[in-house]
Image (cartoon, coloured by chain):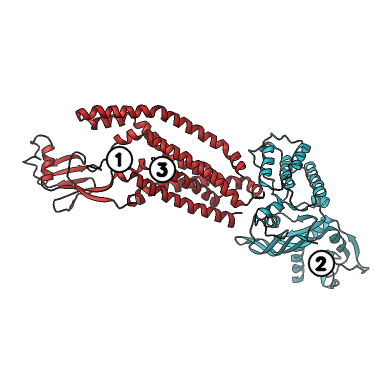
Chain colours: A red, B cyan
Amino acid sequence: MIWLTWRQFRGSAAMMAALLVILATALALTGPGLASDYSAGIAACTQDNTCDRFYDRFFGGHETSFTALTLVVLLLPALAGLFWGAPLITRELEAGTHLMVWNQSITRGRWLAVKLGLMGLTAMAVAGLCGLMVTWWSDPLDKSAAENLALMAPLVFGARGIAPIGYAAFTFVLGVTVGMLVRRTLPAMALTLAVFAAIQLAMPLLVRPHLMPPITSTFELGKTNVDGIGINRDRGGYVEIQLRSAVPGHAGAWVLSANLVDPSGRTLGTGAEGAARISTTSGPCAPSAAGGGGCIVEINRLGYRQQATYQPLERFWPFQWIETGIYALLTLALTWFCFWWLRRRLS
Amino acid sequence: MNTVLQAQGLGRRYGKRWALRECTIDIPAGHVVGLVGPNGAGKTTLLKLASGQLEPTVGGITVLGGRPASGPAQLARVGFVAQDTPVYAGLSVADHLRLGARLNPRWDAATARDRIAQLGLDPAQRAGKLSGGQRAQLALTLGLAKRPELLILDEPVASLDPLARREFLQGLMEATVEHEFSVVLSSHLVPDLERVCDFLIVLVDSRVQVAGEVDKLLATHHRLTGPRRDPDRLPADQHVVSARHTDRQSTYVIRTDAPIHDPAWAVTQLSLEDLVLAYMDKRSADQRVALEVQR
């Protein structure tokens, strides 16, 4: 059975291996250069304190490859489900060959076990290798990325570390299950893609923020968490403050929500924007005052703060393990269902 | 004599439609069994139940004393060549033989090789490029080299031209003589079966109409032709299979073990095809009788 599985699978496995080798070569050739550029840049910028500008310049210079690689790792599990998982059983059913192969002297349970095992492990290995290679390569970029593209950001998180292994295993078995229920290749592929996309959206939106209780804390306003301040003189004067989804002292944290709170702790405004009631006709926040630096100090002195709920960057690896574990459990459940359905219902 | 296939009250339903019902048969070993009936009569369902591809909705079936497809040992004893003889289009002929060798403990590599050579098939040829007849022969080779005790074939010759048909059935017959195994083979064409079968099952409208050895069936079925007569006036031991009436004349096909002495009847022997057609005709004949009674 292992021989048959390999005989039927070797074509696409070889193609996948070739693509993986090309990717690995490209990453191995450019990775060390990227890392040395980064350390040289950091060494230079710490002397004259211009690291923020260096980060922007460095990340901006490699943004295309960063985005492309992230997308590759995000899409790879979908490919495993679409092209390996979904047709696994539908192709047999459509050609009628299940009647031939399930009447050799092996039970269909064993047939499925070998197929799932061999192809599923390959899918996991490819996704894992790809994910870890990209994690290694993009490490300097992840360090210099803006907060919405940092490691913990929803899009990037799923393309780093070991999570792609879990995604690949799950999507592959999902494809097999959908194929078994739908029994036709193209509809099964479409449905697999739809379900995979829905789950990959639901995970960061609904589940991942609660994997560990998020931290809620208040922070003084400063360069890190204020995007800009605007002065509005219409209604007696107040200062509008635009917050960034970042918190001072926790670089790379995944900020789930941030609000401006007044000295009594009441929330001001909604989301990233808030208005503080401060004189704009005189004092540091008047347009005549030089620069905005004094205004921020005044706002902080009056007791306005940023209240943020966030997951710090240190939780990246715990989150990776938990999320991979969740997908592993889902995979096991679907696998059990596959065996049950194959024995009981499919004929 | 031990039985090769035994079914008791066997039935299979798809949704609301019964594909097979109240099927009780007992097939003794050592026969080439023909399963005949019109399209959609339930032949494939019965064969899939026997090979374990389907689970019965009601009733039970045992094949060679075991539950179909209950494990590798049971699977090894039963060969199955499905309708349209599916093979993997992407694999070569040699790959198929390797597949058989890897997946079957009792694989007979010499038989398989010899058969392929005899048929003139190129082992390097991809199965997708084979003609219908060659593909059927490849599927049969897989079934034969498995060395089963029972080989089940579902409409194996349906898509073949007459010459390929004859070659296929001849190959099957030679193998049964050589290796002594039982065969169950379905077809909707009687002439195919007439040449090879010594046991016949007629399946019409998802029910088994008659089952038995061909010789015995031919000896106990007769066509009676004579002046018009109602079926009620036939002797009790004569079971009417089909009846046709004109204004003056009646033609009955009957089953009876007793000799027929009534001088009013002209008694003729039935061919196997006539016999099968009579059973296929039975249902519509029953309906016609009912109509005449109403009139």
Where in the figure is residue A302, as x and y percent of width and height?
A: 10, 47
How crowded is the residue under tag 1: few (<14 C-alpha within 10 Å), some, or many (20+)?
A: some
Which one is in front in this view, the residue at disc 3 or the one at disc 2?
3
Cα gap from disc 3 to disc 2, whole angstroms: 75 Å
Disc on res. B240: 2
Q: Mark 1 lies on which chain?
A: A
Asked if marks 3 and 2 touch (Cβ < 8 Å), the reply is no
Q: In this view, does A72 lie to the left or right of B292?
A: left
Q: Name the residue under label 1.
A: A148
Where in the figure is residue B17, as x and y percent of width and height?
A: 63, 61
How crowded is the residue under tag 2: few (<14 C-alpha within 10 Å), some, or many (20+)?
A: many
Cα gap from disc 1 to disc 3, whole angstroms: 21 Å
Disc on res. A8: none
How crowded is the residue under tag 3: few (<14 C-alpha within 10 Å), some, or many (20+)?
A: many
Tell me the quadrant of the picture where the N terminus of chain A can be found.
Answer: top right
Label 3 in the same subunit as label 2: no
Please state which amino acid type lies under the numbered disc 3. Ile
Cα gap from disc 2 to disc 1, whole angstroms: 86 Å
User: Would you place residue A36 above or below residue B248 in this image?
Assistant: above
Q: Nearer the viewer, residue B197 or A108?
A: A108
Asked which secondary structure carries label 2, the reply is strand
Asked which secondary structure carries label 1, the reply is helix
Please state which amino acid type lies under the numbered disc 2. Val
Which one is in front in this view, the residue at disc 1 or the one at disc 3?
3
Q: Name the residue under label 3.
A: A162
**Which residue appears farthest toward the left when viewing the image?**
A282
Q: Is residue A310 left or right of residue B63?
A: left
Asked which secondary structure carries label 3, the reply is loop
Instruction: State which quadrant residue A59 falls in.
Output: top left
> What residue lies at 28% left-to-right and 41% top-to-bottom?
A252
